[in-house]
Image: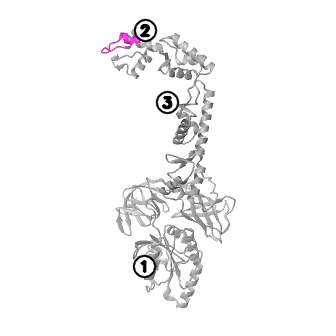
């Protein structure tokens, strides 16, 4: 569980964290000299009935809002800090807007420096704060006067934080692991160390990890949480990770640590539901903004179907980013820009890995995961939807994806892909059309080779195989070995093909044991003779003896008979002796002997060949 502070500069956030935890989170000399928080600070807080939770102290100065965003993006609860004397200030309102845009689930408001105001001013301040909270995620949250100096109200504040923590559901441990990195440094003996808040999943020592973007590989050497070494860390905890196999300079702040065995991908395009704040300027496709998600920040453009995004509205948009980011469906983001520069809106990612850089925004905002899964399936077309990355695209757990798939009608799962049945039917029709064309263009061929048919369908091999299986079950195609054909088709059945086949067969029979080469046959009948020879081979009328040599079946029977009459199993024969026995020259002898070697009829050695057993037929 992570609690993050929010509020205007000098309203006492750091002092309150120190009073609650005993930890000084202003760790940099510059912070201590200027008296303001510049970087994120962290401290453990022990709450009765809850245990140890992490506290993130974020800057309140306008110039450090980007740092505030990096810290606020990983928190479960907000501790909004407001000076009892100064009341609600500009950064209070911006931080409150950011908390709302990030979907923070609740929190507590601390009215600090309460010892410096009287009861009447306290009452006025509480009323003002409650008015400012109206319509926000902290509407109805406890507003508690406290003093970090005197300790007034701290116990009540701890109790309120504990009660708020118990109302927040735990993060999913079965989700993929993700750690947005907010600090990087080196420690003697430990090497490169990164810190952050685990957003989801579980991380263990010695596992392989990746740093994204950049896809740098490393190994988890050690884990530490709240000053204690641990072997495993779950989401919702602050953690320091010692990494092996990577230098400090290779890990930029703003990157994300993920497990190497999980299917994370970076992207420069996101689909999202965007909420533009009521006082923001309109956003057109050419408007430049700053995009913040976790510890990541980059420039972006917002593209919405139908034109500009108007203040106060929620629209389904496409975000085109200047740099790769790592995101997951459901992630909350913030946009900053405008004049004067400030927070203008934010929202939720609705598709973390669109298939195309020009992916259209979804048809409507606030769609359910089931609706978005259906849109993704339609968009995937004949390629099918890759289910391995759907949990990341949708932002749901793998078990939820399985439930959503079962609710879909008229779909088929092929391995890790999902495809609509109508798409399979379209592919089946394409296969039949391809076979019809193949039979027309090459009536001598027995059909299409299966591999060629898969390539012609231009889809994933597993989907192509499913199309072929369905077509065979429906009896609209016939599969013979590795060949596909249409029912009723017979290679060479046409009159012209039959005549050519008979002519080739007659040429081979008349040549006997010294047939013409394939080159010679092509010179007379063209390249189509290859299909004729394969057809004759399928009918058992010819035997392919070598790449260039096709013998009539009876010619091979003759050669085998001569061989059987001459050789003895225990004797080794040289090629010269075999040439005399078979009555053919080396031009045909060597291909025939190699054919015998390949079929185990002969056993070759340096001295020659032995023939343990000679069959009567090939």
- Residue receiving disc 3: 481
Say which quadrant the N terminus sits in: bottom left
- Viewed as shown, does residue 55 lie left or right of 443? left
Tell me which label, 3 or 1, sits earlier in the chain. 1
Which element type, helix, strand or loop, lies under badge 1? helix
Q: Is residue 33 placed above or below 573 in the rendered structure?
A: below
Q: Is residue 606 placed above or below 95 in the rendered structure?
A: above
Instruction: Evaluate whether residue 533 shows in this view.
Output: yes
- Viewed as shown, does residue 510 lie left or right of 158? right
Range of residues picked out in magenta? 561-575
- Specify whether residue 566 is painted magenta: yes
Nearer to the camera, 274 or 562: 562
Alpha carbon distance from label 2 to label 3: 37 Å
Instruction: Evaluate whether residue 335 shows in this view.
Output: no
The disc label shown at residue 20, or none: 1
Within 10 Å of the Cα at label 3, are there few (<14), some (14-19), or many (20+) other Cα atoms?
few
- Viewed as shown, does residue 203 lie left or right of 83? left
Tell me which label, 1 or 2, sits earlier in the chain. 1
- Residue receiving disc 2: 583
Say which quadrant the C terminus sits in: top left
Alpha carbon distance from label 3 to label 1: 76 Å
Closest to the camera, between mark 3 and mark 1, is: 3
Closest to the camera, between mark 2 and mark 3, is: 3
Q: Residue at x 49, y 30 (%)?
A: 481
Within 10 Å of the Cα at label 1, are there few (<14), some (14-19), or many (20+) other Cα atoms?
many
């Amino acid at each position: 569980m992570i609690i993050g502070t929010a509020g205007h500069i000098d309203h006492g956030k750091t002092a309150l964290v120190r009073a609650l935890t005993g930890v000084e989170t202003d760790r940099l000399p510059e912070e201590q000299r200027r008296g303001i928080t510049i970087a994120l600070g962290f401290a453990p807080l022990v709450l009765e009935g809850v245990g140890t939770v992490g506290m993130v102290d974020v800057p309140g100065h306008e110039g450090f809002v980007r740092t505030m965003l990096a810290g606020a993006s990983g928190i479960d609860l907000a501790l909004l800090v407001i000076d009892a004397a100064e009341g609600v200030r500009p950064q209070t309102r911006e931080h409150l807007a950011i908390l709302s845009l990030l979907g923070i689930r609740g929190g507590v408001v601390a009215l600090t420096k309460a010892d410096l105001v009287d009861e009447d001013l306290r009452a006025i301040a509480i009323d003002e704060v409650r008015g400012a909270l109206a319509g926000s995620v902290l509407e109805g949250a406890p507003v508690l006067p406290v003093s970090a100096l005197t300790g007034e109200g701290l116990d009540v504040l701890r109790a309120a934080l504990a009660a708020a923590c118990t109302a927040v559901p735990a993060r999913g441990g079965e989700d993929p692991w993700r750690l947005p990195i907010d600090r990087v440094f080196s420690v003697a003996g430990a090497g490169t160390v990164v810190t952050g808040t685990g957003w989801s999943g579980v991380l263990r020592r010695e596992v392989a990890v990746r740093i994204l973007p950049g896809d740098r590989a490393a190994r988890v050497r050690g884990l530490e949480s709240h000053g204690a070494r641990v072997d495993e860390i779950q989401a919702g905890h602050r953690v320091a990770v010692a990494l092996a196999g990577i230098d400090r300079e290779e890990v930029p702040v703003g990157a994300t640590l993920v497990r190497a065995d999980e299917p994370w991908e970076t992207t420069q395009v996101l689909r999202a539901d965007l909420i533009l704040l009521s006082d923001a300027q309109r956003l057109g496709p050419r408007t430049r903004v700053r995009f913040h998600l976790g510890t990541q920040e980059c420039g972006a453009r917002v593209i919405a179907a139908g034109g500009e995004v108007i203040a106060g509205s929620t629209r389904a948009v496409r975000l085109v980013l200047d740099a790769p980011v790592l995101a997951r469906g459901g992630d909350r983001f913030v946009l900053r820009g405008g004049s004067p520069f400030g927070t203008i809106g934010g929202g939720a990612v609705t598709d973390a890995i669109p298939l195309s850089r020009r992916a259209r925004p979804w048809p409507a905002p606030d769609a359910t995961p089931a609706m978005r899964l259906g849109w993704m399936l339609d968009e995937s077309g004949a390629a099918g939807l890759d289910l391995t990355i759907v949990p990341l695209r949708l932002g749901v757990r793998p078990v939820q994806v399985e439930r959503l798939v079962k609710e879909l009608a008229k779909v088929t799962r092929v391995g890790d892909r999902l495809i609509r049945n109508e798409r399979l039917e379209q592919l089946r029709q394409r296969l039949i059309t391809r076979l019809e064309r193949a039979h027309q263009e090459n009536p001598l061929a027995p059909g299409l080779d299966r591999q060629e048919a898969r390539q012609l369908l231009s889809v994933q091999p597993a989907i192509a195989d499913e199309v072929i299986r369905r077509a065979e079950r429906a009896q609209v195609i016939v599969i013979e070995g590795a060949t596909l054909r249409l029912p009723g088709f017979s290679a060479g059945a046409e009159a012209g093909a039959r005549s050519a086949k008979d002519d080739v067969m007659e040429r081979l029979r008349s040549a006997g044991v010294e047939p013409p080469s394939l080159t010679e046959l092509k010179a007379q009948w063209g390249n189509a003779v290859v299909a004729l020879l394969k057809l004759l081979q399928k009918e058992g009328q010819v035997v392919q003896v070598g790449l260039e040599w096709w013998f009539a079946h009876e010619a091979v029977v003759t050669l085998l008979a001569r061989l059987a009459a001459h050789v003895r199993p225990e004797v080794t024969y040289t090629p010269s002796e075999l040439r005399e026995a078979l009555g053919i020259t080396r031009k045909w002898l060597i291909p025939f002997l190699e054919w015998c070697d390949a079929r185990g009829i002969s056993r070759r050695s340096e001295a020659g060949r032995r023939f343990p057993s000679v069959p009567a037929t090939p």
